Amino acid sequence: MAIQSVSKAPLNNYVNNLNSAQKTQRPQNIANDVAQAGQTTGNNAAAAPTRTADRVELSAQAKALSAQRNTATDQVNAPQDANRAVYVQSIKQRVQAGTYTVDNARLANAVMKDVLNNMG
C-alpha cells in the first residue's frame, strides 16, 4: 500500500493570501484554498471527493414512537399541572383577600438550605 503525500502548498497559499488579501477578497481566497487542500500529489493522485450537506431522515416508525412518547408524557404531567393550577389559584385568592400569611421560620429554613446547597 503506497502512502500518498499531501502538498503543503495550499496551506501556504492560504496563509499568504490571508495576510495580504483585503477583507472583501478573503472569502473567495478561503474557498479556493479549501478546494485545493483536498488535492493530493503523486502518481496515484485521486480527485478530491465532493462534499454534500449532512442530513438526517427519521423513519415513520421513529416518528410514531416519538409521538407516543410525547402523548404519554403529556398524560403523566396533566394531573400534576391541574393540581398546581388549583393550588396557585387558591393562593391568588388568599392574597387578594388578604388572608395569605407566610411562615417566617419555614421561609428562613428554606433560604438557608438553598444557601448551603449552593456553597459547595
Image (tube, helix red, strand yellow):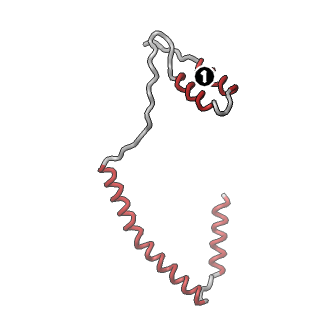
Q: Please tell me whether residue 34 is drawn above or below residue 67 in the rendered image.
A: above
Q: Residue furthest top?
A: 43
In the rendered image, which quarter is residue 32 located in? top right
Q: Please tell me whether residue 57 is drawn above or below residue 65 in the rendered image.
A: above
Q: Quadrant of the C terminus?
A: bottom right
Q: Residue furthest left?
A: 61
List x then y, in percent, for residue 74: 39, 66
**In the drawing, does residue 44 fall left or right of residue 59?**
right
Image point (67%, 33%), residue name:
23
Of 102 and 15, the residue lying toward us:
15
Image point (32%, 47%), residue name:
59
List x then y, in percent, for residue 65: 33, 54
**Crowd class of label 1 (few under 14; some 14 to 19; many from 20; radius 10 Å):** some
List x then y, in percent, for residue 63: 33, 52
Q: Please tell me whether residue 109 is drawn above or below residue 48 in the rendered image.
A: below
**In the drawing, does residue 102 fall left or right of residue 53?**
right
Which residue matches tag 1? 11
Element on which disc 1 rests = helix
Tag 1: amino acid? Leu
Of 14 and 28, the residue lying toward us:
28
Of 110 and 68, the residue lying toward us:
68
Q: Please tell me whether residue 57 is drawn above or below residue 68 in the rendered image.
A: above
Number of numbered discs on residues: 1
Q: Quadrant of the N terminus?
A: top left
Image point (63%, 30%), residue name:
25
List x then y, in percent, for residue 106: 62, 78
